[in-house]
Structures are given as structure tokens and as C-alpha cells.
Image: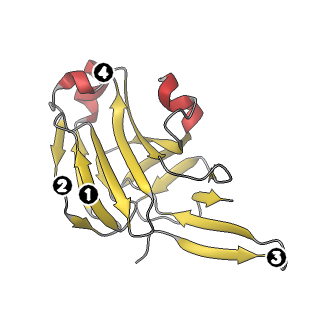
Amino acid sequence: MSFFKNLFKGNKEQEVKKEVIAPLTNGELVNISQVPDEVFSSKMMGDGFAMKTNDGVIVSPVEGKIVTIFPTKHAVTIESVDGREVLIHLGVDTVGLKGEGFETFVEENQEVKVGDKLVKMDVEFIEKNAKSSMPIVVFTNLSEEESIKLVEGNVNAGELGKIEIVK
């Protein structure tokens, strides 16, 4: 299953939409502007979205390869088969937890498919010890013409129609 599903509309002027798979097993999608960290909310690192997770299980939104797992386990980067660079940052001010509250299930250079379990967060621990437990997904290499279109609200892993990259 490919990470992006190309949908073309119109005749001469085509608007290209690429649907993105929801990367959490159970929770809520939130506009990136709601993240309590200016680096993310102002899109300094790129456009994306945030989530409120109920169970802390984060799955791969893309088919690709794990590029980086931060030593503190608070972030994972993936390069999708379509060449997208996807940063999944788990919470805000979580680097100071030094890996506590995170369990990883993948390794660097590992190939992943959509829905593969990446990380389990101890949401309760993180909420008590960091600024936010909100997972954040940022596409760090979108073109200037591309942006994220998001339908906020409840979502389940693998659900389509809630997140799109639009051009």
C-alpha cells in the first residue's frame, strides 16, 4: 500500500491531491498551529499536523525507510518511497526526558510499511513531565506550492480522507 494516493481533478488546470494515512491507532487530528511550540506552530520546519493520542501508539504513515531515531526516542524521521521526508516528533520539550516514556519498535535503515508500529508513548508520564504529549508530523521537504489540508477531529490508524498534501 503506497503512502500517497494521487487524485487528479479538472481538465487543463489539475489540482493534485495526495492523501496521507493517519499515523496513530486512536486519537484526534489537530491543526499544527495549535502545537504549544513556535518552531512547529509557525511551520519553521515545514507544514504538517499534530495529534492527540489516546493510547500512545504511533504507526508509520508512509512506506519507506527509517532514517533517524533520536537517541532520546522522542523523534523519528522516515524517507517515504515517494521521496517525502517525514519527521514524527513526539511531544513538546520531551528531549529532556532522555528516552524515558518512549519504547521504539524500529531501527535506523529499517524498511517500514504503512501501519507498522514505530513508537509507544507513555502518555500519562509525558503529560506530567513535558510541556505536551502531542505527537507532531512535519513534512520537511514540501515544495513552496504544497501545503497540508486537514480535517480535524477523531481519527484511527490507516484512515483516509482526513489529511491531504495539496498543490
What residue is at 59 percent from the left and 74 percent from the top? 6
Quarter of the image that includes the N terminus: bottom left
Pointer 2 with pointer 4, Cβ within 8 A: no
What residue is at 38 percent from the left and 42 percent from the top? 53
Pointer 1 with pointer 2, Cβ within 8 A: yes
Task: Please tell me the numbered disc located at residue 66.
Answer: 1
**Distance CA(mark 3)–CA(mark 4):** 46 Å
Q: Amino acid at mark 2?
A: Glu
Pointer 4 with pointer 1, Cβ within 8 A: no
**Distance CA(mark 2)–CA(mark 3):** 41 Å
> Mark 2 = which residue?
108
Pointer 2 with pointer 3, Cβ within 8 A: no
Instruction: Give SS at disc 4.
Output: loop
Point out the tag, 4 or 1, that comes first from the N-terminus: 1
129 or 149: nearer the eye? 149
Point out the tag, 2 or 4, that comes first from the N-terminus: 2
> Mark 3 = which residue?
10
Instruction: Give SS at disc 1.
Output: strand
Lateral position of residue 7 relative to residue 11, left or right: left
Residue 136 to residue 15: above or below: above
Between disc 3 and disc 4, the foreground one is 3
**Distance CA(mark 2)–CA(mark 4):** 25 Å
Q: Amino acid at mark 3?
A: Gly
Instruction: Give SS at disc 2.
Output: loop
Label 3 packing within 10 angstroms: few (<14), some (14-19), many (20+) = few
Where is residue 14 drawn, in percent x and y?
Answer: 77, 72
Task: Give the image quarter of residue 30.
Answer: top right
Point out the tag, 3 or 4, that comes first from the N-terminus: 3
Task: Please tell me the numbered disc located at residue 130.
Answer: 4
